Image (cartoon, rainbow, N blue to C red):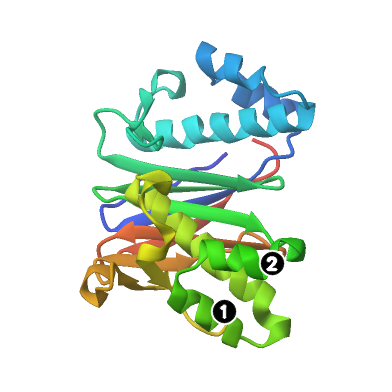
């Protein structure tokens, strides 16, 4: 698999990966996993879930190893205080998300990054769930969207909020109601307010990143003016 020469300080790279592996690809990524990761993979009851997790984790090691100039198996991946994976002793921050056979991996230097991807399932779009996920302002905007566009608006908001939470690295310890994102289908992806402050929101940049038609995705990183580069992993490594 051809990888970019390097990750510049003013770039965020986002990779899309197909998690439905061929036998060759599964073997390749499985061989990159640590004993602890193989043990974790063995806890999945379904083969499809186990294989998807191994491909996602192996792909993470493969790409991070390239950017960190380190053998994938030797990468010191640990878990932060609130559960976000991190690379000890490196200036790389990363975030990974997967949904229904598709994974997204975001990587940046010298800034926090978060990514989320969701398969668009209209059955999840309920008023109760929207009230739970969204701030009061977001919920009001959601209800103002034309009914036929609400599914897209819902998943826009959901992925953008999840991506920001992941970038913060605080998990659900940071209340979903404490920040507002855009969600209308015609509106650009952006953070509007954080804890009521537009200036705090300006310290972050958000972009849509949609791997394929039936999915919604978003990436968030600290700072302004960085460039987004998107890559797709081929079906065979």
- Label 2: state its secondary structure: loop
> For mark 2, what is the residue?
125
Percent across and percent down for residue 69 are 34, 30
Report the quarter where the N terminus lies: top right
Residue depicted at x 68% and y 81%: 149
Please say if the residues under marks 1 and 2 sit with CB atoms less than 8 Å apart. no
Report the quarter where the C terminus lies: top right
Closer-to-camera residue (171/227): 171
216 is higher (above) or lower (below) than 13: below
Q: Which mark is residue 178?
A: none
Closer-to-camera residue (111/6): 111
Res 143 → quadrant: bottom right
81 is higher (above) or lower (below) than 151: above
165 is higher (above) or lower (below) than 197: above
> For mark 1, what is the residue?
142
Residue depicted at x 50% and y 58%: 230
Judge from the rendering whether residue 210 lies leftward or rightward of residue 138; answer left or right: right
Packing grade of label 1 (10 A; few <14, some 14-19, many >=20) is many
- Label 1: state its secondary structure: helix
Packing grade of label 2 (10 A; few <14, some 14-19, many >=20) is some
Earlier-in-chain disc, 1 versus 2: 2
Judge from the rendering whether residue 206 lies leftward or rightward of residue 128; answer left or right: left
Residue depicted at x 41% and y 35%: 83
**In this view of the protein, can residue 57 be seen by the observer?**
yes
Marks 1 and 2, Cα distance to the nearest angstrom? 11 Å
Specify the farthest residue to the top. 35
């Amino acid at each position: 698999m051809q990888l970019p020469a390097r990750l510049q300080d003013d770039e965020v790279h986002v990779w899309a990966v197909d998690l439905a592996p061929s036998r060759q690809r599964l073997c390749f990524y499985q061989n990159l996993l640590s004993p602890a990761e193989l043990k974790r993979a063995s806890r999945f009851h379904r083969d499809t879930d186990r294989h998807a997790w191994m491909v996602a984790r192996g792909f993470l090691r493969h790409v991070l190893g390239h950017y960190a100039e380190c053998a994938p198996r030797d990468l010191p991946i640990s878990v932060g205080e609130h559960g976000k994976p991190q690379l000890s002793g490196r200036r790389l921050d990363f975030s990974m998300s997967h949904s229904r056979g598709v994974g997204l991996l975001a990587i940046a230097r010298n800034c926090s990054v978060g990514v989320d991807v969701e398969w668009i399932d209209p059955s999840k779009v309920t008023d109760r769930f929207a009230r739970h996920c969204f701030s009061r302002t977001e919920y009001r905007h959601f209800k103002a969207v034309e009914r036929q566009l609400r599914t897209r608006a819902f998943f826009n908001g959901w992925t953008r909020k999840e991506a920001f939470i992941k970038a913060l690295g605080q998990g659900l310890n940071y209340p979903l109601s404490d920040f507002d994102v855009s969600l209308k289908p015609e509106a650009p992806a952006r953070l509007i307010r954080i804890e009521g402050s537009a200036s705090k929101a300006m310290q972050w940049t958000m972009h849509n990143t949609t791997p394929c038609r039936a999915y919604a995705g978003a990436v968030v990183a600290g700072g302004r003016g960085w460039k987004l580069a998107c890559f797709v992993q081929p079906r065979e490594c």
